Image (spheres, grey):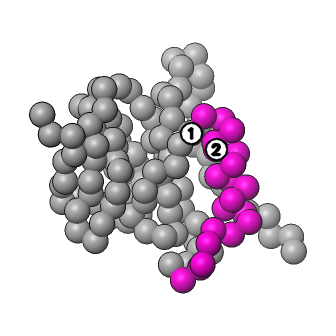
Amino acid sequence: MKETKRRVELFSFYDRTGLEAHLARMAGRGWLLEKIGAFLWTYHKIEPRQLAFSVCYFPRASQFDPEPSQEQQTFYEFCAHTGWTRRPAPSSRSFTMSGPPPSPSTPTRRWRWRPSTAP
């Protein structure tokens, strides 16, 4: 059986919920996002499992930034500390995180990260 799969995905960059649901379905079928190219998304084979995905958007980020900002680094570290893994994203201004699905007793809440405006 093939270990990688390449697909043309037609998602809007701003369709966070659609991307999250699609990535969760693919993980349930045994495919985890590995790389996003100009036209093709590459997935690698995993054991089918339930994962939660979150697509985050940083409006201040740019494809011309040499590296992630301190705010982004802090957020990445926080996510890693709580068990999330950074995945490829459709733009340099966004990134995708995968992690364990929330337990049924965990209240569902949509968080929006806002960087501080203090200098």
Mark 2, other Cα within 10 Å: few <14 / some 14–19 / many ≥20 = some
Image coordinates of residue 98 in percent, x first then y, are: 48, 41
Q: Answer with the quarter of the image where residue 70 lies.
A: bottom right
Q: Nearer the viewer, residue 37 or 22?
A: 37
Callout 2 amino acid: Cys
Residue 12 in the figure: left or right of residue 39: right
Disc 1 secondary structure class: loop
Q: Nearer the viewer, residue 13 or 87?
A: 87
Q: Are marks 2 and 1 in contact (CB under 8 Å)?
A: yes
- Residue drawn 43% across the image and 68% down it: 91
Quadrant location of the C terminus in the rendered image? bottom right
Q: Is 49 above or below relative to 23?
A: above
Residue 111 in the figure: left or right of residue 87: right
Marked residue nearer the N-terminal end (2 or 1): 2
Image coordinates of residue 64 in percent, x first then y, are: 54, 83
Image coordinates of residue 11 in percent, x first then y, are: 28, 60
Q: Which residues are magenta?
A: 64-83
Image coordinates of residue 60 in percent, x first then y, are: 62, 75
Mark 1, other Cα within 10 Å: few <14 / some 14–19 / many ≥20 = some
- Res. 119 visible in picture: yes
Q: Name the mark on residue 84.
A: 1
Q: Nearer the viewer, residue 80 or 107?
A: 80
Which residue bears the numbered disc 2?
Answer: 79
Callout 1 amino acid: Trp
Q: Answer with the quarter of the image where residue 25 lies.
A: top left
Quadrant location of the N terminus in the rendered image? top left
Residue 112 in the figure: left or right of residue 43: right
Look at the image and say whether residue 40 sits in the magenta stretch: no
